[in-house]
Image (tube, helix red, strand yellow):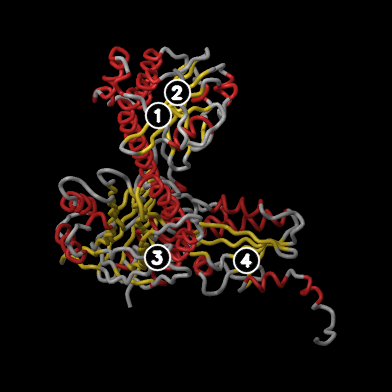
Amino acid sequence: VKLADVQFSDHEHVVVARVTGEIDLSNADSIENAVAEATPNHALALILDVSALDYLDSAGIHLVYKLREKLRARGQTLRLVIPADSPANDALRLAGVSRNVDTAETLDAAIAEFSTDAAAAEVPDQGSV
Amino acid sequence: VPLEKPHHHAPRAGQTVLPPAETGLAPAHQVEPFARLSDPALSELGLEEFLDELLLRVRDALNVDTVAILLHDPDNDQLVARAAKGIEEEVEQGVRIPVGQGFAGRIAAERVAIFIADVDHADILNPILREKGIQSLLGIPLIVEGTLIGVLHVGSLVPRVFGQRDLAILEVAAARAAPGIERARLFSALEREHQVAMLLQRSLLPKRLVDVIGVNTAARYLPASDEVGGDWYDVFELARGRLGVAIGDVVGHGVRAAALMGQLRTALHAYAMQDYGPARTLELVDRFVQAMPDYAMATAAYAVLEPDTGEVQIASAGHLPPVVIGRDGGRVVDVTPSAPLGAFSYGRVQEHELVLAPGETLVFYTDGLIERPGTPLTDSIEVLLDVVKDASSVEGLCRRAVERMVPAGGLRDDVAIVAIQNSEIDDELELQLPADPKILAEIRLVLRRWLRHQGANDSQTMEITLAVSEACTNAIEHAYSPAPAQFTLRATAEDGQLTFVVTDVGRWRAPRGQDRGRGLTIIRAAMDEVEVNSSETGTEIVMHRKVGP
């Protein structure tokens, strides 16, 4: 049985990679490579959704840092979807890594951040329909 | 003297129907070669050799240029060229003649002998006869106990009138040879089907059972004494260390049942891997069966075992109830079976739950193991429980079931049995492990199971598993050795105070950069007390943590 699986989906300006299963030293590198590979140049950002991940440890945290560097070099942003009550968040908490602006609570919130609507929302509200 | 044409057969161009010949017409010296065709020793030959021998003798006895045998294929009511002398192309090209058409087809349909004096002007279907330059033909049906099995015909490259004497010789040859052909044909067909089915059955069953932490597994498959059936079993690993166990029985026997079994086993396995759970998995296999072009029906049961807790989810589509064997004997699991796969459209499958205590074994089997004429199934299941209750291992259990339940004289139906045991949990862990990252997932499975046994709650289990996994990761990353490196993990418990020691043969390396130091940070945060002891011989990480309410 594969320890983890990655499912990709394309959205307006972003690619979502949803990782399920477990990430440890045995598969962190191949997951990082697969995710970086699956993010096309035209995407503004990669959303790494680990909300359904069962296990993450320092190898997985290391993966996140390496992936962020890789994307930054291509001018792209990494967003993480890590709900507060997820195993991934427990690992971050124990590792003393604080959740920051790169982290979203839900996938929808992360996607909305990069959508055209989000840009439009910056203009004054024209009333509702 | 040419032969008279009977009136009750519809005339066809150039064909003359001959009445049966007087047996006495055949000269003894010409019939003699066929006497030995009914020799049992000869009929032991394979079909090919037997036909070859027959054709040579017919050719010599009648002094003809061509001889051919076409056998009847009842599936599509055609004659298939099976052996020939002088017109080998017939066989090589796999000539097929529909019964009722042409020369051979009419012989088969009307079961009469037919003579054709001039092939060029006769109603024949097979162009090879003309292409070979055959001028005249004589053919007769091959009949065994009233059943048509084929057609035998001879040909001459020069115009020839086949008379009553020729017909008599050919009829003797046919009468002697037909039973031998039928025997040899049945034998080779059955033999071939049996071999194909056995091969199929063997290739479709798991080569070896998966090795899952905390579970012992064993299985057996036995074909029936005369043919294979559609029984199968399957054991596979699911995500998060769970184990899937399936068993099934396709209605029917032979190659078709074995092939269908392979499809159902694969379908069930594939749906199961998608984590649908037992009831939904069986519902999906049912829809798969419903969508098959041919009628098919099967019974099946599927269960998922969580080794951490011993919890089992189980569902049955018309399958016999599994049994649980424990230290205090056995019991039949109360699984109300839903309808068999393929029985009703959109059938719903019910899911049941049970807990397999450490040491207990869940046993699935097919009806071949317990079905005996005149004995109610419930009685047979009691006998099975009695036979296997003292088995000391899952292998021993399967061996006993097979030895004691299979009747003398062989099985009438095939048998599958599969047993999974929730293994006993040791109070202490002492594991010698290879320094290979792949082992980490297994370590976590062992730990989770052991921690639950020690009374750890969910969050304690999560934190301790994470910390120990980090310590093991460190041992694997730092292992240096020309030989395959190893490290050890020990876990002990005393009044809810757990101690874990991970020892490697490498030196503790100073963390390289901020990222790499995170492992030790996690260990310290997750455990109550942590020591790192480095020496010339290796590094030891000792971790303590209290668990319980």
The 10 Å Cα crowd at callout 3, few under 14, some 14 to 19, many 20 or more, is: many
For label 3, the SS is helix
Q: CA distance from mark 3 to mark 2?
A: 101 Å
Q: Earlier in the sequence, mark 3 or mark 1?
A: 1
Left or right of B234, for residue B114: right
Give me the C-alpha separation between circle 3 and circle 4: 25 Å
Q: Amino acid at mark 1?
A: Pro
Instruction: Report which residue position mark 1 lands on.
Output: B19
User: Is residue B68 visible from the viewing direction of this image?
Assistant: no
The residues tagged by marks 3 and 1 sit, at their Cα atoms, a distance apart of: 96 Å
Q: Do the dots labelled 3 and 1 sit on one chain?
A: yes
Is label 3 or label 4 in front? Answer: 4
Q: Can residue B24 be seen from the camera position used here? A: yes
Corner quadrant of residue B3: top left
Q: Secondary structure at mark 2?
A: loop
Circle 3 residue: B464
Whichever of labels 3 and 2 marks the residue nearer the N terminus, that label is: 2
According to the picture, the residue beneath numbered tag 2 turns out to be B3
Dot 1 falls on a residue whose secondary structure is loop
